[in-house]
Image (cartoon, rainbow, N blue to C red):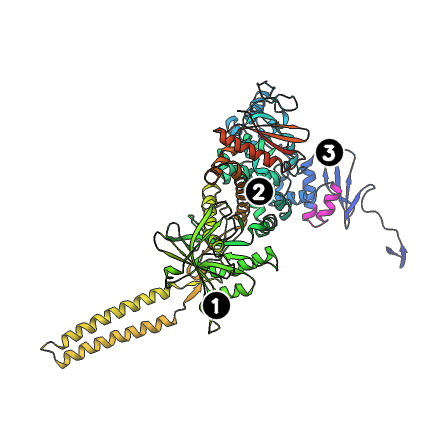
Amino acid sequence: MAVTVSGREWAMAPLPMGPGGSIPVGPGVDVLIDEDGAGSVFLWGMAAWYWAAGDDSARRLAAVQLVNAQHASQRAVAEVLGLNESTLWRWRNDYKEAGTGALVNERKGPKGPWKLTDDMAESIVSKRAGGASLRDIADRHGVSTDTVRRALASKQTPKPEPEPEPGSGSGSGRVLVPLARPEGRETERQAARRGALAGAAPVICEGASLPLAGALVILPALAATGLLDAMDTVFKPVKAAFYGMRSLVLTLVFASLVGEPRAEGLTRLNPVDLGRLLGLDRAPEVRRVRQRMAALGEQNRGDELFKALADRHVNNNPEACGVFYVDGHVRAYHGQSKVPKAHVARIRMSMPAELDTWISDGRGDGILVWQAEPGASLVGELKRVATEIRELVGPNRRPTIIFDRGGWSPALFAQLDAAGFDIATYRKYKVTPEPRNRFTEHQLVDDLGRTQTYLLADRNVRLPYTHNKTKRRFDCRQIVRLDPTSGHQTQIITTRTDPDPAPLAYAMFSRWRQENFFRYMRAHYGLEALDTYETTPDDPARTVPNPAKKAAAKHIRQAKTELAKAEAIEGRAHLSPGRTPAGDRIVADALDIQRTELADLKTAARAIPVRVPVTDITPAAARLNDNTKRIHDAIRMATYNAETALARLLAPHYNRANHEARSLLHEIFTSPADIHTHNNKLHITIAPLSNPRRTRALQALCDDLTATQTLYPGTNLTLTYTTKNP
């Protein structure tokens, strides 16, 4: 810089604004912090703020006012004071809302005496080991759930002392503890809360007669569906949590197998019993499951999950994926939101509901599902069905799509045939019955080993339809089945050209497998569960029939009826004696007025639009949010397919498998079992069942499952299944 003295300019070195050792944080702003933690802020060399060592409140106030006065940036102040920038941002918000008092660093929490005594801590640990939830323990002791967590973290959960039991020894010579309790995992829970753990690893709880352990037989079949792999691949990792993706999915799987397919059903299961199956100390609570599933739903990847499962299913079951069944399933809604209506066939009424379109394979196992648009017809949905199936099977195969009369459209049949698909459906509308002498007997042995006998008539037909205002005909095949008892004929339309019509008839009549799939899923897997209360606004561009059009048509019908009555009365009166010209004119004028009113009503009705945007009729129109629902459905479908695979494995070993396979599996799922590890194997020894023949079938199933060499998820332990000697 330069100064002028006696008319001459002299150059001078700039003087330092801040004292030695200070740190500049802005133009003319320096901060000096001594070894004890006391600090000062200098503005252009003048001390403006000061805080003593240990006076954190004054330090916070200086930092906030430096930034608020725009003397320095938030980042620079945070760096020189050793703060996180978000912390300083939070202080500024507190200061803005409550003033200086909000920056006072007082001890948080209760100001009274500490409630957590040693006796209380031991009581908390004991109750937690007994399966009580954190909320129940906190309410019983009059403390917060955070206090309960601190007590659990400060004391180790006592390990049960082994008590010998005759016949409970493992193959390694160890004695298994009856009803052994898993070790506490509070240290890992604390690590997850700090963000240092993303999913606790499974730790096997070895013990004898462990409840619900029979449900572990599902794991080999579940691994074949690829559910766990698909969940890990499709969804992005969530924030650190004690319950990882594996634990979350297996919780829902095991809960469904033992009869609680909905999230709230976890309140009716012992969390410790379910936790043993997960390799944890306890299963997650309802709130945690809902939060985690909602977080996954926000990623909006349910369709990708289903496609990953469908690809795995088609690759593993090529023999069942030459035929696909398609049908819609209506989920009734009983809430307060303005959801579009749909016809619920099973209760024969129209009510708020959502329509799901399902695709199943030739054995009735679920493959794909999506939420259809309101009012969607099966004819319209079949176009998307064809696209989805083509992506699954590839360009070189010609699969068969089977559906009911709701998809009747010869024009669509022609499009599907040209696109490389065969179709099969029931013929719609009345047709001339086939003569009795056209029917011949056909037999086949179906995929379940049963002999099917049909009386069939087979011939080619041409179905008329209109395309681009041009009349055309579609050539196809008609197979008619005759019921010898009632004489009823059932017509099947197909494009398949197999020489023997019996397999085609069997495939068409087996469409009930998909109906059975819906029925079983509703009863045992909560297919119609809401799963989330969230809704999304309906598409404002979607149009619906205008109710004003219907009301106008009603007024026209009433006016026509009144005019017809008046004309009839006038006609009868015209023949009666005593009529005068003046009276005739009055009657004629009245009739002219009615005719004019009727014409005006017709003109006004023609001006009313037939369809209007849905928001004009129902401003609060909404749709059920299916993001979370689709993930639950994928887990349920994979679990159902796994259970069905076990039922098929039972068929050669159980004579009544066609009628009792699933009831036998339900008994296995809820049976106790011994669990122990030896030589890198996880041994599951299931208790005998209700009668010897069921136990023998279980042992044969165990042998088949052991042969798969499946690993317990998250470990390198090979699953080995056996049964106890009765």
Which residue appears at 9% of the width and 77% of the height? 577
N-terminal label among 3 and 1: 3
In the depicted view, which residue is nearer to us: 485 or 421? 485
Please, what is the three-letter code of the amino acid marked with disc 3?
Ala
Of circles 2 and 1, which is in front?
Answer: 1
Please, what is the three-letter code of the amino acid marked with disc 2?
Arg
Residue 510: x percent and y percent?
Answer: 47, 51
Q: Name the mark on residue 292.
A: 2
In the depicted view, which residue is nearer to us: 650 or 88? 650
Q: Name the mark on residue 140.
A: none
Write down the region rendered in magenta: 66-81
Res. 450 in view: yes
N-terminal label among 3 and 2: 3
Residue 407: x percent and y percent?
Answer: 46, 60
Residue 72 among those drawn in magenta: yes
Of circles 3 and 2, which is in front?
Answer: 2
Please tell me in which quadrant of the rendered image residue 183 appears: top right
Does the residue at mark 2 contact the one at mark 1 (Cβ under 8 Å)? no
* Mark 2 secondary-structure assignment: helix
In the depicted view, which residue is nearer to us: 404 or 551? 404
Please tell me in which quadrant of the rendered image residue 31 appears: top right
Please, what is the three-letter code of the amino acid marked with disc 1?
Phe
Report which residue position mark 3 lands on: 53
| Residue density around tag 1, few if under 14, some if 14–19, many if 20 or more, within 10 Å | some
Of circles 3 and 1, which is in front?
Answer: 1
Which residue appears at 40% of the width and 52% of the height? 345
Res. 286 in view: no
Does the residue at mark 3 contact the one at mark 2 (Cβ under 8 Å)? no
From the image, which quarter does the N terminus lie in?
Answer: bottom right
Q: Give the number of marks.
A: 3
Report which residue position mark 1 lands on: 474
* Mark 1 secondary-structure assignment: strand
